[in-house]
Amino acid sequence: MENMVNFDRLFGGIYKGKKVVLTGHSGFKGSWMAKWMEAMGAEVHGFSLPAPSVPNHLACINLKIHQQFGDIRNLQEITSFISSVQPDIVFHLAAQALVRQSYIDPIEIYSTNVMGTLNLLEACRKTASVKAIVVISSDKCYDNREWIWGYRENDPMGGFDPYSASKGCTELLTNSYRNSFFNVHDFGSKHSVLLGSGRAGNVIGGGDWAADRLIPDIVRAASQNKSVFIRNPLATRPWQHVLEPLSGYLTLGWRLLEGKAEYADGWNFGPSGDSNLTVDEVVNLSQNYWDKVQIEYSKNPGDAHEANLLMLDCSKANKLLHWKPVWGIDETISKTISWYKDFYTSNQVDTMNDIEEYVLHAKTKQIVWVK
């Protein structure tokens, strides 16, 4: 299958030979992103805290990239790193990403997600080589009204819990830098940087072992022949495989590197409408692909607030970036659960195989970035 995928031609071949800084490369999404970019021939430089769990995806995939472990909250450290690399493009994925943890340590959430992003943008502003920046945010950046419609990019920022509010702040900060220092009207005259942001919903896939996330909780329990305890079975989310938003971020980065200022904006990257499922529906689908998945329901009245209904409207990315999701919900759940099942039962890591299959499927659907 590997010979069937010409990786260095993806996204117009823009990433081959490019110097790329990827913050948060040790995390779930970041490690998948690093593996994909490595396959495309990019010179990837990762900056992150050490991997947050044992086991972890980073340790599974044998990356051959440049790595530096450091703290995005340290301005001097990240500035020195960006300056030493002299990257063409920066993808900023480093973040504290757990809602329940934000109630335990809100200072960590805000200092990492807001001040960390500020430090990164300042470091980029001082580095002349940088041509494009993609800040990765979250669907939780929106002021959640618990309504049935998907949120659009021009809806108000907000956030009930500290994590969600920190993501709203991150988007406001990013927009402020886009207006103040990287204004598209001054592009090519006063500066040469295009700044975009990407917002994705609930992302799943192999290699995530974070606490208090549905899929990691399911597979941990299954690997130990235990039941998983479900807190909020009717909560509805837009579930998507990790490769879906990554293809969106890479599409956005492609256009920014081409110098197309009209794409320097915020973008939603979410699944099709049939992938908006309740937690209960996701668990039931998971049982189709691993018979060891067992559930019990546990609702503690003292549990912290979590959104019940949250969906994205991705019309803007569909129409203007010509980005579309590749896998439906059945393939998403199948690939995710099978990754863990193979890992736990055969010590097999399916990451590269999943990337190859995703690209081949995108080709059959004539997705713009694989042409």
Image (tube, grey):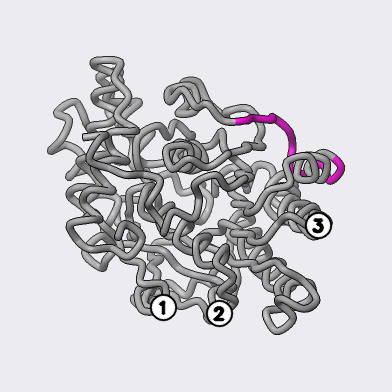
**Residue at 44% of width from left, 39% of height from top?**
32
**Residue at 63% of width from left, 37% of height from top?**
45
Residue 262, numbered circle: 2
Asked if residue 146 shows in the view, the reply is yes
Q: Looking at the image, which is closer to me, 173 or 190?
A: 190
**Residue at 60% of width from left, 41% of height from top?**
24
Which residues are the magenta region?
66-76
Mark 1 vs mark 2: which is more N-terminal?
Answer: 2
Q: Which residue is mark 3?
A: 122
**Residue at 25% of width from left, 60% of height from top?**
275
**Which of the 4 quarters of the picture holds residue 223?**
top left
Q: Which residue is mark 1?
A: 320
User: Looking at the figure, which quarter contains the N terminus?
Assistant: top left
Camera-side mark, 2 or 3: 2
Distance (Cα) linking label 1 and label 3 = 29 Å
**Which of the 4 quarters of the picture holds residue 334?**
top left
**Which of the 4 quarters of the picture holds residue 314?**
bottom left
Q: Are marks 1 and 2 in contact (CB under 8 Å)?
A: yes
Which secondary structure lies at badge 1? helix
Mark 1 vs mark 3: which is more N-terminal?
Answer: 3
Q: Amino acid at mark 3?
A: Glu
